[in-house]
Amino acid sequence: MPAVAAKLLAWYDACGRELPWRVRGGPADPYRVWLSEVMLQQTTVAAVAPYFAAFTKRWPSVAALAAADEAEVMAAWAGLGYYSRARNLHACARAVAESGFPADEAALRQLPGIGAYTAAAIAAIAFGAKAAPVDANIERVVARLFAIDAPLPGARRAIAAAAATLTPETRAGDFAQGLMDLGRAICTPRAPKCLACPLRENCAGFAQGSAADLPRKAERPPRPERYGTAFVARRADGAVLLRRRPPRGLLGGMDEVPSTEWGAKGAPATPPWPGDWQAAGSIMHTFTHFRLHLAVARAEMAAPAPDGMRWVGADALAEQALPTVMRKVLAAAAL
Ligand code: SF4
C-alpha cells in the first residue's frame, strides 16, 4: 500500500511530535536512538524524557557510557524500572564502544538487550534501513488498518508481516515514527479519532466498523499477589542500612533494605536482627508478573553494618540504585 506510506509521511511531516531524541531531515545519532528506544521499552515518553536528558548530559557518547562503572549506570537508572535494561545497556555500550553500532538489523540483534523491535527501530531510524519495528502503538494501527481480528499475542506474527508490507523504500525511520505518533495521537486504544485520520480511506477496520475493538487480546490470568515485610534500620544521624541485590534476577544489582521472602500471605515477619521494630505502614508495588504488598517495619540501630550491608547517609540516598519499590518503603518509614 504505497498510498499509506505517502499519506502517513505527509501527516508526520506536518503533525509529528517533537521529541528530544528525534531528528528531522537528517541522520539521527545511533547512540541517542538506541538509548531512547531502550529507555522507552515498557515506559512512557514523559517518564523517559528526564532520564534521557540526564544520561546524554553525563555520558554524551556511547564510549563515555561504556567507560562508566556499572553501579553508576544502575544508580542513574533508578526509578525507571525493568533494571535488567540498565545492565544490558552498559554491556551493549561496552560491546560497541570501539567499532560503533552496526547498521544491520541482524547484527544489532546480537547485542545485549536489543530484541527484534529495538533492532528494527535503530536500523530504520538511525541508519535508514527498510526495517519495520512494531511497538504497541504500531501494533494497534496495523491491526486496525488490516482488520486483523485474531487475538494478541498470537496475532503478532501476522501484524508484523502486515507492517512490513507498508514500509517504504526510503524514510522507513520516519514512517515508523509516524505510525507511533498516529497510534498515540489519533488511533488511540479506546476511541480512535478516525475522522481526523489520514489513513481512513485505507483502513479496513474503519470500513468494517470494528476498529475500536482491535487488536483483540486473549484473556490474561489475574496477576498473583505476593507479601512480605521490609525492615528499615536507621542510625541516629539519619543513615539507613542498605544492601545490594544479587546481579541477576528481579531488580538485579539494585539496592534495597532487607526484607523477608516475597511469598504467600501470613508468613512470619522475622527481622534480620533483634531490635525495637515498630510497624510503619505498608506499601504496594506492581511488577509485570505479580503485585507486591510489603509491610514496613523500622528500628533505631547504632551497631556497625552487618556483613554485606552498608550505612548510607540520608543525603546520599538519592544517588543510590534504589528501585521505586524501595523508595516507597523508605517513604513509608518517613526517611
Ligand atoms: Fe486507526 Fe481509525 Fe485511522 Fe483506522 S481510520 S488507522 S482505526 S484512526
Image: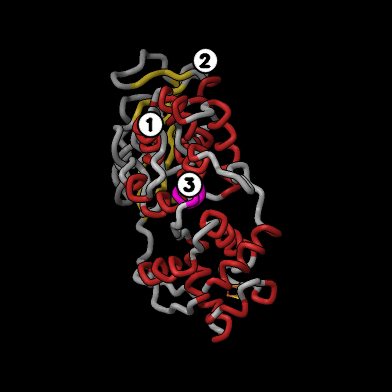
Q: CA distance from mark 1 to mark 3?
A: 15 Å
Number of numbered discs on residues? 3
Look at mark 1 in the image and give the residue it sits on.
99
Write the start and end of the magenta stretch as one range: 123-128
Q: Amino acid at mark 2?
A: Asp
Q: Amino acid at mark 3?
A: Phe
Some atom of ligand 1 lies within 8 Å of the CB belonging to the residue at label 1: no
Q: Secondary structure at mark 3?
A: helix
Residue 150: percent from the left, percent from the top?
39, 77
Q: Which residue is mark 3?
A: 127
Q: Which residue is mark 2?
A: 237
- Residue 4, given in percent of the width and then of the height, sits at 57, 71
Q: Position of residue 12 (x, y in %)?
A: 64, 59
Dominant secondary structure (helix, strand or loop) of the stretch shown in magenta: helix
Q: Nearer the viewer, residue 161 or 183?
A: 161
Q: How is the image coloured?
A: secondary structure
Q: What residue lies at 34% left-to-right and 21% top-to-bottom?
A: 309
Instruction: Point out the residue furthest to the front here.
Output: 169
The Cα atoms of the two marked residues, 2 and 3, are separated by: 53 Å
Nearest the camera: 7 or 309?
A: 7
